Amino acid sequence: MLKSIVVLAVNARWAHTAFGARSLIANLGDLRNRAELVEKTITDRPVEIVEAVLDRDPAIVGIGVYVWNAAVCAEVVSMIKALRPELPVVLGGPEVICRDDLPPVAKGADHVISGEAEVAFRRVCEQLLSGGDAPPGFIVAEPPDLAQLEPAYDLYSDEDLAHRKLYVEASRGCPYGCKFCLSSLDERVRKVPIKDLLSALDILWRCGARHFKFVDRALHFGIGPQVLEFFLERFEEGAFLHFELVPDHFPRHLGELLARFPEGSVQLEAGVQSLDPEVAERIGRHQDLDRVEETFRYLRWETGVHIHADLIVGLPGESMDGFGAGFDRLFSMQPHEIQIGLLKRLRGTAVAREADGWGLIFNSEPPYEVLQSDQIDFRSMQRLRRFARSFDLVFNNGNFPGAAALLLHGISPFDRFLRFSDWLYEMTGQSHRIALNRLARLLALYLNTELEIPGERVATVLGKDFENAGRSPIRLQIDGTEGRRRGGSNALPGRQRRHLD
């Protein structure tokens, strides 16, 4: 019996599906029927991932390495090589794109493919299985012709179609030169032939797929009016589409099509990153800020799309005050969500090469987030990290629209929420894993005692939030007893306390 080629995908969440891994398998040619996909998540134990791989008795193992799974993959590769040193391990993905800046996971691998790997991976597998000369240790893959690639959509299972996010590709590359982004390394935009794309979408739709996430860098690169019209002709309740957007290059004719979709059924992820013109110029992101604002207001009030806007903390030359001013301006445009992420050191980007000159210090462990910049010291960066997490819990998740409106109402929503975020950390010592009911009580306490909003009004607003979310009513005790200052509690550890309860 011929041994298999195992392609391992370690996803961030179970709901995600690995498009890249499926594309590798789809393009193995005559070897495709020997390939097996193993999908795991970063929450799985590495030793159990290794067990799942070796149970297939593979002849070759291919692994996609990303910033979010690099640490897990390093453990997996180390164990595979300890148990089966003769088993060839082939790595690809963004984390191993730069020959001069390879992560620890690459040290245990036999072969590394840099770039879009569909064609290169097939050739490596053919060479290894033929018993001829071994492939090079580091291979730079030429970008394939998208018209010649085999589509991978038939590798989505029925369970994938019913319960998971399906990733769809209409183009690759990006014409913009943002220095923090890996997409800027390929400034050519190559499109999947529209006939092939529509055919794939039709097959997926007829198989029951209703949630589609397009991986293109922007809606207007590879996704023309034909794609939106395709979904409009078939649209039904429960369908959901996700696209990325460069807001100051958004064409109005696409907006007119988006306005025909039911409210909330389309999400646009708008990469703003910074609203400081000098910072934007420094990182190669040349934005027309007035046009950004015009696009947001059009989408917000003339269409029913859900707007998810991105900002980055720690960009070169951006101070805390500058970030706050940008946040306030973006908040005034009223996107539904503002996702705040810390700048990451992505291998191969200009930010990674020029970090010292910009005073950027990054964590050496994945996901390589910035610790300090020339404008924001470590302690302030930590405050902004907590700000981002707390904002996600209170505002982005949509659990507390009424309470969030009270909390953020003022001249500077940034200043108001930063004060709340600092207070929340002082009271709890954490910004993660705060149960929803507890967070509601802490919000009530802050609104009442710190912002001096009458307790009756706070209770009414939060009660309405819970009612609108379809959750059980919560009893709020606004008397200052909910929170405890860090270090001031002699409570038993959780496990022991639960046994006593």
Image (tube, rainbow, N blue to C red):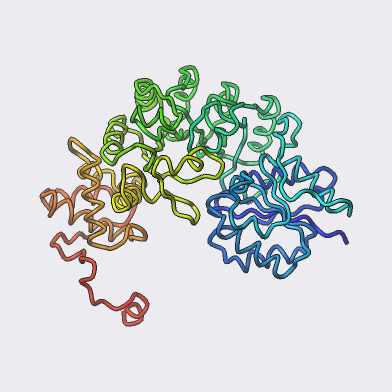
Q: Where is residue 414 in the image (x, y as percent from the top left)?
A: 25, 41
Taking the image as shown, residue 244 lies to the left or right of residue 48, namely: left
Taking the image as shown, residue 106 lies to the left or right of residue 494, namely: right
* Residue 302 in sight: no
Taking the image as shown, residue 134 lies to the left or right of residue 331, namely: right
| Foreground pick, 498 / 178 | 178
Quarter occupied by the C terminus: bottom left
**Is 133 rendered above or below residue 236?**
below
Quarter occupied by the N terminus: bottom right
Q: Where is residue 39 in the image (x, y as percent from the top left)?
A: 64, 55
Q: Where is residue 73 in the image (x, y as percent from the top left)?
A: 61, 58
| Foreground pick, 426 / 16 | 426
At 56% from the left and 21% from the top, the residue drawn is 225
**Is 430 rendered above or below residue 239?**
below
| Foreground pick, 296 / 352 | 352
At 76% from the left and 31% from the top, the residue drawn is 148
Taking the image as shown, residue 447 lies to the left or right of residue 290, namely: left
At 36% from the left and 49% from the top, the residue drawn is 372
**Is 375 rendered above or below residue 289?**
below
Tally the numbered discs.
0
Indicate the quadrant where residue 493 lies: bottom left
Q: Where is residue 363 in the image (x, y as percent from the top left)?
A: 44, 54
**Is 233 rendered above or below residue 336?**
above
- Outermost residue, top side: 253
- Outermost residue, bottom side: 500
* Residue 378 in sight: yes
